[in-house]
Amino acid sequence: MTENEISYLIRGAVFKLYNAIGPGLLESAYEMALAYELRKEGLEVKSQLGLPFKYEEVKLDVGYRIDLLVNDKVIIEIKSVEALADVHYKQILTYLKLSDCKLGLLINFNTSKIDENIKRVVNNL
């Protein structure tokens, strides 16, 4: 599957989850429920995946974690905040660069309009 095909399935799962639960929960609840929905779709999902940070020849374990990695291609960063900030976009873009993934989805579930709060972030796609 391509990144765009995976993204399509992710968006469908996000809408299903949001329509069933709505806003107001912790990020961890949305993360676990979304992982469950994506696995039901037959996708491979890794949760809270450690992301090593390499600077020059030194590999540093500084505790960065990807919320969800789908089919080893698409990173999902989940938020439950009043509004997405510039730093959230920078965070997922950096995760994409460190992991060599091309597509990330930044999703804020704490909203009244979920369709406007699923943001695509690309790295050489």
Image: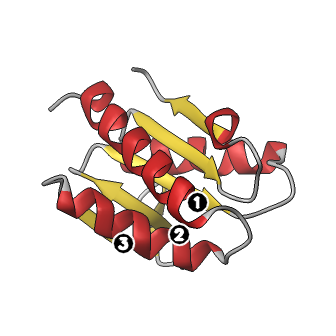
Q: Amino acid at mark 3?
A: Ser
Amino acid type for the residue under numbered disc 1: Ile
Residue topped by disc 1: 78
For disc 2, the neighbor class at 10 Å (few under 14, some 14 to 19, many from 20) is many
Residue drawn at point x = 59 percent, y = 46 percent: 106
How many numbered discs?
Answer: 3
Task: State whether residue 51 appears in this view.
Answer: no
Residue at 74 percent of width and 71 percent of height:
24
- 6 is higher (above) or lower (below) than 15: above
Q: What residue appears at the point 58 percent right and 60 percent down from the top-left corner? A: 78
State left or right for residue 40 relative to residue 18.
left
Percent coordinates x, y for residue 29 in the rendering: 54, 78
Q: Residues within 10 Å of mark 1 (few under 14, many from 20)?
A: many
Are the residues at dot 2 and dot 1 in contact (C-beta closer than 8 Å)? yes
Query: In this figure, which residue is indicated by the disc labeled 3?
Result: 47
Q: Is residue 24 above or below residue 71?
A: below
Front-most of residues 79 and 58: 79
Q: Residue 28 in the image: x percent, y percent? A: 55, 78
Q: CA distance from mark 2 to mark 1?
A: 8 Å
Q: Is residue 40 above or below residue 50?
A: above
